Image: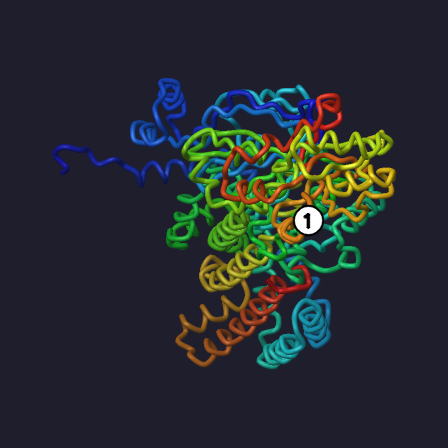
Amino acid sequence: MDKFLPRLPFAEWIDNGVDWLVVTFGTVFDGISDFLKGIVEGSVEWLDMVPSILLAVLFALLAWFVSTRRIALFTLIGLLFIDYLGYWYPMLQMLALVLTSVFFALIIGIPVGIWGSQQATARKIINPLLDLMQTMPAFVYLLPAIFFFNIGVVPGVVASVIFSMPPTIRLTMLGIQQVPKDLIEATEAFGSTTWQRLTKVQIPLAKPTIMAGVNQSIMLSLSMVVIASMVGAPGLGEEVYRAVTQLKTGVGFEAGLSIVIVAIILDRVTQHAGKKKQGGITK
Amino acid sequence: MSDQIASKKIEVINTTKIFGKNAKRASQLLNEGKTKGEILKATGATVGVKNASFDVYEGEIFVIMGLSGSGKSTLVRLLNRLIDPTMGNILLDGEDIVGMNKEQLRNVRRKKIGMVFQNFALFPHKTILENAEYGLEIQGVAKAERQAKAKESLGLVGLAGYEDQFPSQLSGGMQQRVGLARALANGPDILLMDEAFSALDPLIRKDMQDELLQLHNDMGKTIIFITHDLDEALRIGDRIALMKDGEIVQVGTPEEILMSPSNEYVERFVEDVDLSKVLTAGHIMKKAETVQIDRGARVALRMMKQLGISSIYVVDKAKRLLGAVTAQDASSAIEKGKTLEEIMINDLPMILLDTVLIDLFDIVSTAVIPVAVVDENNKLQGIIIRGALIGALSGDNQFINNNGTFDSDSDEQTDTEVKVNG
């Protein structure tokens, strides 16, 4: 092979590209970095101002409002248990990281998904990109993220956003495309604009599917917390990482269990939020 | 419905729809007279509608009928451009919708054309009222006003009181009423109904057909109705277009389609039709011989002798049926010096012009003299003799009057141009 085709220096190109980006857009990245850091650390500070027990009760009430009493009860007990184990503050840090990541994954992912649902050409661009985002090992883009955003919570957020966005985009596209053709025809036949068709029929009907995507994004983002901790993101992930590197199996399990509890709460609550309020009747 | 004076609501002129990438090449082949199958083989493109031309008149129910795959659903979607035609023009009130931009087209869809779908296509996340409101909602009509209009049209279809239910809580027939109400709420001139009743069971379908006819009578909208069911087409259509392989094979009134099929395909299509449910008294009646009441028994008897008949109908000056006299009664009246009024039979069996044959059997089989056919004003139109009834049922054209019209008397010609389905 070598004789016929010269080896193209892809790695070198990418290195040069990253260097160029860092130098050229340094201030932009710094701005983004400060912004994200402000959001995550700010929300941790705010949440920490509330006494842990009160906050656990508030979360439980919120869970009750959105889903069922059983889930609310589990939320209360689970959070109090985490508090009892002494992982309250790391839990808050992780929650801030996860929710910030999911927030950005959604405000980028849902519009992209809607766009993709409308245009076949858009889908041709989006789909391979999503494959790349989901299968490219997270460590690989964690590295340039450090160059761009320094060590700390921000590269963690960025990596989580990239990793957790695909399901939201995919399921938004799917949900909208799955709206029956005759309903689309009906909206068209009555003279709807594209925007009216989307907002009055397609998105409301796609909501359960979109919510399933949101749920998956949250889960993926949670699965990133340990990896994010390797670049310095604080939280429960950091506790697990430290326990593993120091071979403290017990501590690792405690922190890991706390992550699982938070994951179950978020999963159940978002699943129910998707099912509820669907035209009064399940169909 | 007298459509001699009706204006053209929709004109479809040489409209073709070809699906697929090679539309241009395919339309070339089409012009060369190639068939649908040959074009599919040569280009991979499917001919949906082939060179369709027809007019729809204001206020009529125009039925497009054909088997599945005949292109009828495509054709109806060309009318509001849910599908864009490949070639041709479609004029709506004289305006070509093919050349319209998106904005103009939206306006036409919002104001002029309502559509009802085969599988109802109701929005499952909206209540019945919200469904009926939809057309007005997207036009930006204020909530109170659009709710009032939506309620009104729900009332028209008999769904008052169901406003807050969801579509999945209603039966199929009721769901389609919502579909109809949703289309009516906009106040369109034209209703497109794509196999609107095909998903309903037969009894409900019949009810819905009756109600549609009633609504049509009350509101006078132009309705284009797609169906694969010949009985349905004959029942509700003022005129029917029959489609096969994307082509319109014949356009005509139900009678024309049944009585003079333009080709073998139409003939085969209609051969199983139960004529007794389609033909009416007007189709098989014969000229009635009449005598005016003030003429006296002598005149009546002479007329019967001349014509070689044994009874004659007695009418007033306005040709309203009063009764009948037999030759026997007339001659005895002459002997006793009685008037026609004294001897005529008053309780004659009478039927209306548009009575279908199946409802005639009883009365015709028991009648002593031929049954009289009258219009709503009791004017005598003709008579029914048994032989004609049986002959017509056997499909013998010699017993069937074309178009259901009948020249009962040369001086009454203007008055008797009566369409049977009208």
Q: How many marks?
A: 1
With respect to residue B335, does A59 lie above or below? Answer: below
Q: Position of residue A28 (x, y in %)?
A: 56, 38
Q: Chain of mark 1?
A: B
Q: How is the image coloured?
A: rainbow
Residue A22 in sight: no
Q: Can you say which quadrant of the picture contains the N terminus of chain B? A: top right
SS at badge 1: loop
Residue B329 in view, yes or no: yes
Expressed as whole percent of the image width and height from the top left, the position of residue A188 reads 61, 38
The quadrant in which residue B362 appears is bottom right
Residue B374: % across, % down: 74, 39
Nearest the camera: B217 or B297? B297
Q: Residue furthest left?
A: A3
The answer to whether residue B326 is above or below residue A42 is above
Along the viewing direction, whichever of A40 and B150 lies nearer the viewer: B150
Say whether residue B146 is left or right of residue B109.
Answer: right
Q: In the image, B242: left or right of A244?
A: right
Tell me what residue is drawn at x 25 percent, y 35 percent.
Answer: A8
Q: Is residue B376 left or right of residue B254?
A: right
Residue B296 spot, x, y in % from top left: 84, 32
- Vertical placement of residue B204 versus B260, above or below: below
Residue density around tag 1, few if under 14, some if 14–19, many if 20 or more, within 10 Å: few
Where residue A218 sits, quadrant-wise, is bottom right
In the image, what residue type sits under mark 1? Answer: Val
**Along the line of sight, the residue nearer the viewer: A155 or A101:** A101
- Name the residue furthest front: B335
Q: Quadrant of the C terminus of chain B?
A: top right
Q: Nearer the viewer, residue A269 or B161?
A: B161
Q: To which residue does mark 1 refer? A: B368
